[in-house]
Amino acid sequence: QVSGPFPDSAKSAHAESSMSEEEQDRQIEQWKIKRLVKMLDSARGNGTSAITLILNAKQDINLTNKMLTEEYGTASCIKSRVNRLSVLSAITSTQQRLKRYTRTPPNGLIVYCGEV
């Protein structure tokens, strides 16, 4: 039987403390993403007041913005004032978020916008 400088319980603690800083950063990032996904999963919009926009890496942001502009024109015809303003606000907010990007990131883009 081989014995080292650490007792068995200390070996596992030593292994954890020797985890690279890069690995720790990766685990923290994964935890943040999991927390964000849980929060988004629990978020509930009032029917048409929330927009989920999913773009793969090949989709053009300019065409998506054009589509949102067309949707804005269509939404202007909604009779219910509260509903219409809610939809128009969500579309405008989504367009503002898209303006932050000149092209779709290589891993795609998901945008959640609206009133929750």
Image (spheres, rainbow, N blue to C red):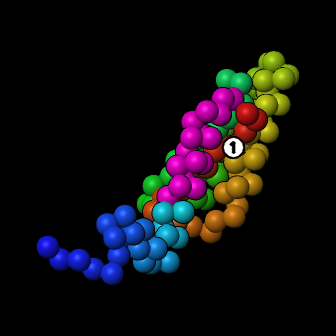
Q: Looking at the image, how many numbered discs can be counted on the residues? A: 1
Residue 45 visible, this orientation: yes
Residue, disc 1? 113
Q: Residue furthest left?
A: 1
Q: Which amino acid type is shown beneath numbered disc 1?
A: Cys
Badge 1, how many Cα within 10 Å: few under 14, some, many 20+? many
Q: State the SS at label 1.
A: strand
Between residues 71 and 93, which one lies in front from this camera angle?
Answer: 93
Left/right of residue 110 with respect to residue 85 in the rendered view:
left
Left/right of residue 71 with respect to residue 63 in the rendered view:
right
Q: Position of residue 73 (x, y in %)?
A: 73, 37
Residue 90, above or below 10: above
Q: Position of residue 12 (x, y in %)?
A: 36, 66
Q: Quadrant of residue 87?
A: top right
Left/right of residue 75 with respect to residue 32 in the rendered view:
right
Specify whether residue 30 is painted magenta. yes
Which residue does the image show at 69% across and 29% down from the upper left?
Answer: 45
Quarter of the N terminus within the rendering? bottom left
Give the residues in magenta.
29-45
Which residue does the image show at 69% across and 64% down from the upper left?
Answer: 100
Specify whether residue 57 is painted magenta. no
Q: Quadrant of residue 90?
A: top right
Residue 63 visible, this orientation: no
Residue 85, above or below 38: above
Q: Main secondary structure of the magenta part?
A: helix
Q: Residue furthest bottom?
A: 5
